[in-house]
Amino acid sequence: MFAYARTLSTWQPFLDAYSRKMISCAVSVDLDTFLTLVALKTAMAQRRSGSHVIHYSVRGVQYASNEYMGELKNYGFLVSMACIGNPYENAMMESFFKTLKHEEVNLCEYEIFRTW
């Protein structure tokens, strides 16, 4: 599952819906396809998944890009995206971000950084 937290930098976690654990997280100044690819590849390095994996995300352009969709296809993932305007479909990720913001983001100051 994918979504993002907006601070002065962008956090891109990758959650396993079955175990309810975060298996990777990428952080960048930009919210783009590169950031989502880093999170995906890091997650795949952590967990070697077999076929029949469902990749669920919101309808952001970074998830719908040809490059990202091609990488999902290379891994053999089935793709599922949220319906437009239905926040309840992504409830698990929203709950994760509520906890993250409450326990971390709102308590800290973050500096802008750039990775090249």
Image: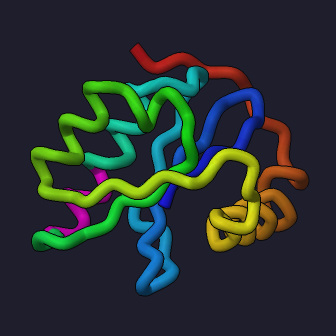
Q: 105 left or right of 22?
A: right
**Is residue 77 within the magenta segment?**
no
Looking at the image, how many numbered discs can be counted on the residues? 0
Q: Position of residue 93 (x, y in %)?
A: 63, 64
Look at the picture and state if 37 lies above or below 102: above
Choose top left, top right, bottom left or bottom right for residue 35: top left
* Left/right of residue 48 with respect to residue 83 in the rendered view: left
Q: Nearer the viewer, residue 24 or 90?
A: 90
Q: Which residues are magenta?
A: 42-48
48 to 65, vertically: above or below = below
Residue for point 63% across, 34% down: 10
Q: Position of residue 18 (x, y in %)?
A: 42, 84
Residue 98 falls in which quadrant of the image? bottom right
Front-lying residue, 47 or 68: 68
Q: Is residue 43 magenta?
A: yes
x 75%, y 59%: residue? 87
- The correct choice, above or below, for 108 with respect to 91 in the image is above
Judged by its main secondary structure, the magenta piece is helix
**Residue at 47% across, 66% down:** 15
Residue 17: x, y in percent? Answer: 46, 77
Q: Residue lying farthest bottom?
A: 19
Decide if residue 12 is in sight here: yes
| Residue 100 in view, yes or no | no
Judging depth in this view, the residue of 32 and 105 nearest the camera is: 32
Q: Nearer the viewer, residue 97 or 17?
A: 17
